Image (spheres, rainbow, N blue to C red):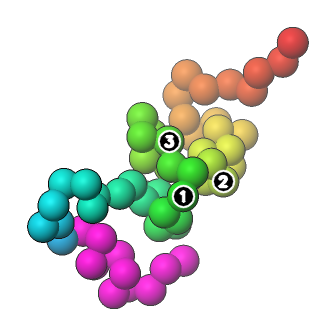
Amino acid sequence: MPRKGIIERWKRPKKFKVREYTRCSVCGRPKAVYREFGLCRVCFRKMALEGKLPGVKKASW
């Protein structure tokens, strides 16, 4: 979990649009974030397996 200051700095509007980046809404991880869900891959997998994300199921082939 990132420090509170990093989260607050991330929420502020950026001077330039290209400086904006996505963070996981649960843990604050800055990398591997799915835009559609706003979750990182770790939180996405955890919540999907728990059934907390409607319409998402594990692929099997």
Task: List the residue tagged with mark 2.
Answer: 42
Task: Please tell me which residue is depicted at 68% across the width and 25% down the height of the picture.
Answer: 57
The reply to whether dot 3 and dot 2 touch (C-beta < 8 Å) is no
User: Identity of the amino acid at label 3?
Assistant: Tyr
- Of the pair 21 and 49, the residue shown nearer to us: 21
Check residue 47 in the rendering and tell me which mark sits there, or answer none: none
| Secondary element at image label 3 | strand
| Secondary element at image label 2 | helix
Task: Please tell me which residue is depicted at 37% across the width and 81% down the height of the picture.
Answer: 6
Name the spot of residue 47 as percent of width and height, x first: 62, 46
Name the spot of residue 13 as percent of width and height, x first: 14, 65
Q: Is residue 25 above or below residue 59?
A: below
Q: Which of the two discs, 3 and 2, labels the residue nearer the N terminus? A: 3
How would you rate the neighbour count of disc 1 (Cα within 10 Å): few for under 14, some for 14-19, many for 20 or more? few
Name the spot of residue 31 as percent of width and height, x first: 54, 58
How would you rate the neighbour count of disc 3 (Cα within 10 Å): few for under 14, some for 14-19, many for 20 or more? some
Q: Is residue 61 left or right of residue 33?
A: right
The residue sitting at the top extreme is 61
Kindly report the distance in space between the C-alpha atoms of the residues bearing marks 3 and 2.
10 Å
Quadrant of the rendered structure where residue 21 is?
A: bottom left
State how many labels appear. 3
Disc nearest the viewer among 3 and 1: 1
- Of the pair 13 and 18, the residue shown nearer to us: 18
Q: Is residue 29 magenta?
A: no
Magenta highlight range: 1-11
Check residue 34 in the rendering and tell me which mark sits there, or answer none: 3
User: Identity of the amino acid at label 2?
Assistant: Val
User: Identity of the amino acid at label 1?
Assistant: Lys
Task: Please tell me which residue is depicted at 51% across the width and 49% down the height of the picture.
Answer: 33
Check residue 31 in the rendering and tell me which mark sits there, or answer none: 1
